[in-house]
Image (spheres, grey):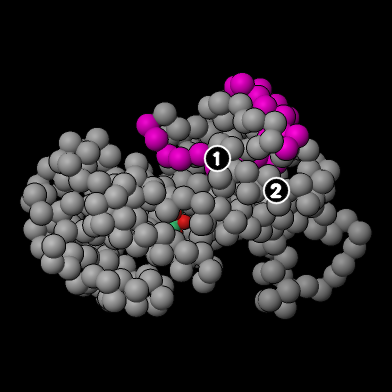
């Protein structure tokens, strides 16, 4: 077989691009803008493989217009909610993702968001930075202690477990909801709840680590925010679709929730402008996996999947 033609839709890490150029007939989108529907459709006629990010949307409508040339979509992401998997499967297009390698980086960011939200990072930074720090008192910027508190995790997959591991370093009491109970070896003492409602009742801190699917869209709505203990802190490094943002805002404005730490939003890029007025919301722009180490590992994992596919083997992360 001649060298497969590969389209890389975004500027991945240098090491990834070098390896891709060594092994494939590769075209890289150095402009680094998200691939449009028209570009994806055109690429399906010119390339055997695409490495996209979550910024490219393989909707049913787009996939229906694909040519037969495209054989594999090797995602540079663990989340695949941007891909209509049944449509891609029906077209005989293989789809892979990059699990495991971003779990620690994402868990680190969840920890940053949890601590920052709990301890007034937004207002504290601004007051010092803008020269408005003109007084101090014992009652000043009193936050919520993480050490020893109860942490609820929804979705105890790889990232959820990595976050639990870091939270154990803060002596947190870990509770989780997952579709199935973990083995004792994986749970490491975390308490299983067989319903989200049961988990919410004990979650002084709540962190979301489940994928966005039709079932999890709007998972945290007004009724469920109300089930959290008063003064709870909510962290989301998974997907914006999991949270009803208007309900989150109401829960913060009413004082029922103390704070939120968000790396994901319903609208990305951009986020929710209504959040900007709230110091209780510590926000980052979807950078959970954005460390040098992890970007290389994600790119290499996507290339490992491609290499296996074009060698006639089953890619390790075939979905
Ligand atoms: C990535 C992510 O930054 O992997 C995912 O699902 O959401 C992020 O960690 C992004 O998808 C890179 O393509």
Q: Secondary structure at mark 2?
A: helix
Above-or-below relation of 269 to 267: below
Q: Label 2, on which residue?
A: 165
Q: Nearer the viewer, residue 308 or 5?
A: 308
Residue 287 spot, x, y in % from top left: 50, 62
Residue 232 spot, x, y in % from top left: 70, 39
In the rendered picture of this protein, how many numbered marks are placed on residues? 2
Above-or-below relation of 88 to 283: above
Question: Does residue 268 show up magenta in the picture?
Answer: no
Question: From which residue to which does the magenta span run?
Answer: 187-214
Q: CA distance from mark 2 to mark 1?
A: 12 Å
Q: Nearer the viewer, residue 316 or 230?
A: 316
- The single residue placed furthest to the right in the displayed view is 138
Quadrant holding the N terminus: bottom left
Q: Nearer the viewer, residue 195 or 204?
A: 195
Name which residue lies at 62% across and 30% down.
182
Q: Label 1, on which residue?
A: 157
């Amino acid at each position: 077989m001649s060298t497969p033609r590969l389209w890389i839709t975004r500027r991945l890490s240098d090491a990834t691009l070098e390896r891709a150029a060594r092994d494939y007939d590769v075209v890289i989108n150095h402009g680094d803008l998200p691939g449009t529907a028209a570009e994806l459709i055109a690429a399906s006629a010119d390339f055997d493989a695409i490495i996209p990010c979550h910024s490219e949307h393989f909707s049913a409508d787009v996939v229906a217009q694909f040519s037969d040339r495209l054989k594999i979509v090797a995602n540079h992401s663990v989340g695949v909610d941007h891909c209509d998997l049944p449509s891609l499967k029906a077209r005989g297009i293989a789809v892979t993702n990059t699990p495991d390698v971003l779990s620690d980086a994402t868990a680190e960011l969840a920890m940053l968001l949890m601590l920052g939200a709990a301890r007034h990072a937004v207002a504290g930074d601004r007051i010092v930075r803008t020269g408005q720090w003109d007084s101090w008192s014992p009652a000043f910027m009193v936050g919520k202690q993480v050490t020893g508190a109860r942490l609820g995790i929804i979705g105890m997959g790889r990232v959820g477990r990595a976050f639990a591991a870091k939270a154990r370093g803060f002596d947190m009491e870990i509770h989780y909801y997952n579709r199935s109970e973990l083995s004792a070896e994986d749970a490491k003492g975390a308490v299983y709840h067989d319903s989200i409602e049961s988990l919410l009742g004990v979650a002084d801190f709540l962190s979301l680590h489940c994928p966005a699917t039709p079932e999890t869209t709007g998972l945290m709505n007004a009724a469920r925010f109300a089930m959290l203990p008063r003064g709870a802190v909510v962290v989301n490094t998974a997907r914006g679709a999991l949270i009803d943002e208007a309900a989150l805002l109401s829960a913060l404005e009413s004082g029922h929730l103390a704070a939120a730490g968000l790396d994901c939003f319903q609208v990305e890029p951009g986020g929710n402008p209504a959040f900007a007025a709230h110091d209780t919301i510590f926000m980052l722009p979807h950078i959970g996996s954005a460390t040098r180490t992890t970007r290389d590992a994600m790119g290499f994992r996507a290339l490992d999947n491609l290499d296996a596919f074009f060698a006639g083997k089953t890619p390790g992360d075939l979905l």
